[in-house]
């Protein structure tokens, strides 16, 4: 796991976007796994800038998102489909038909999840998976206590995640945050060939510590990423503050990135 500690969220977002731009230039048919939340927005803006500058095209890229709230239609302004359209898809030249987000209104949600897994498999798997991390160490909506081999399924949000998500979304009203979601599993995420995880701010310190330097445990589902051969963590100094080997990670990753 490479931990790239940046001076600012802006610098980290730029570096992560550069990694994706480079990959899509090398393989225009890249399959992306995408995340929502407040964390990747700056990176999505940087990706859009590169498209606008004519540096890269997403015309042949296909994407699968991590999760969607159960019970929200795609048109709901707090749905993850709506978020992706506004924050990325409408800003780049991707074909909307090539973008996939789980259907929060699926009549048979378990079938929806099984079909999603099959779609990803048929696409040849995810080349690059973008992740944020919850303050409780979750990836996608895989909350503490989730099996580290879980597959895409209906999941239950913890009170802490509901609180975190209400803070920035749903007008701050916890009662409006759905309590369930459809989410890629931990096992599904780990099959991605490469993983880019972003983490910013003091609120993510404990989660990052658990993920990078803690033991592997289902109580911090992100900790399983220690077993993955190609994970890049782009974070700011606030999120990295509790890491014991932060100077070492910073030097090693800067050297590898040629910075
Ligand atoms: C989003 C997702 C979540 C978020 C995490 C962090 O699709 O799956 O795991 O990445 O909850 O959210 P933010 O970025 O809002 O702090």
Image (spheres, rainbow, N blue to C red):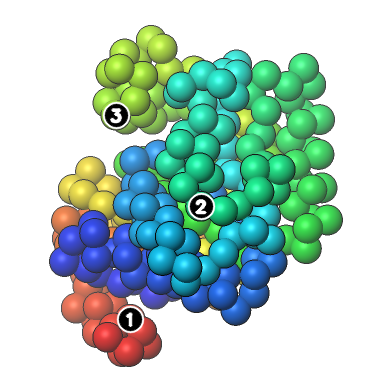
Q: Is residue 122 left or right of residue 221?
A: right
Quarter the N terminus occupies: bottom left
Q: Is residue 133 left or right of residue 128?
A: left
At 79% from the left and 38% from the top, the residue drawn is 114
| Mark 3 residue's CB less than 8 Å from ligand 1 | yes
Label for residue 168? 3
Give the SS element for disc 2. loop
Q: CA distance from mark 2 to mark 1?
A: 29 Å
Q: Residue 124: x and y, percent?
A: 78, 63
Instruction: Please tell me how crowded label 2 is: few (under 14), some (14-19), or many (20+) other residues with Cα within 10 Å.
Output: many
Q: CA distance from mark 3 to mark 2?
A: 24 Å
Quarter the C terminus occupies: bottom left
Q: CA distance from mark 1 to mark 3?
A: 31 Å
Label for residue 92? 2
Asked whether disc 1 touches disc 3, contact meaning CB atoms under 8 Å apart, the reply is no
Q: Is residue 84 left or right of residue 200?
A: right
Camera-side residue of 112 and 18: 18
Image vertical order of residue 187 relative to residue 255, above or below? above
Query: Dividing the picture into quarters, in which one does residue 166 lie?
Result: top left
Sequence-wise, the earlier of marks 2 and 1 is 2
Give the labeled residue for mark 1.
253
Instruction: Please tell me how crowded label 3 is: few (under 14), some (14-19), or many (20+) other residues with Cα within 10 Å.
Output: few
Sequence-wise, the earlier of marks 1 and 3 is 3
Query: Dividing the picture into quarters, in which one does residue 247 lie?
Result: bottom left
Image vertical order of residue 91 relative to residue 249, above or below? above
At 66% from the left and 34% from the top, the residue drawn is 102
Q: Is residue 221 visible?
A: no
């Amino acid at each position: 796991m490479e931990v790239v500690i940046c001076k600012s969220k802006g610098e980290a977002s730029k570096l992560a976007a550069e990694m994706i731009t480079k990959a899509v230039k090398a393989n225009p048919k890249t399959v992306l796994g995408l995340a929502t939340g407040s964390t990747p927005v700056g990176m999505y803006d940087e990706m859009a800038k590169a498209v606008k500058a004519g540096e890269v095209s997403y015309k042949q890229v296909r994407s699968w998102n991590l999760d969607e709230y159960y019970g929200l239609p795609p048109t709901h302004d707090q749905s993850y489909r709506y978020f992706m359209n506004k924050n990325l898809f409408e800003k780049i030249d991707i074909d909307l038909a090539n973008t996939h987000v789980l259907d929060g209104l699926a009549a048979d949600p378990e079938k929806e999840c099984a079909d999603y897994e099959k779609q990803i498999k048929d696409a040849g798997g995810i080349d690059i998976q973008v992740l944020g991390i919850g303050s409780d160490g979750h990836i996608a909506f895989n909350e503490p206590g989730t099996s580290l081999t879980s597959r895409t399924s209906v999941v239950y949000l913890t009170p802490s995640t509901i609180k975190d998500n209400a803070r920035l979304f749903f007008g701050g009203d916890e009662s409006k945050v759905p309590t369930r979601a459809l989410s890629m599993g931990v096992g599904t995420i780990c099959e991605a060939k490469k993983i880019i995880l972003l983490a910013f701010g003091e609120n993510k310190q404990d989660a990052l510590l658990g993920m990078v330097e803690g033991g592997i445990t289902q109580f911090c589902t992100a900790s399983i990423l220690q077993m993955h051969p190609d994970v890049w963590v782009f974070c700011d100094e606030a999120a990295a503050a509790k890491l014991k080997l932060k100077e070492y990670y910073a030097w090693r990753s800067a050297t590898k990135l040629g910075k």
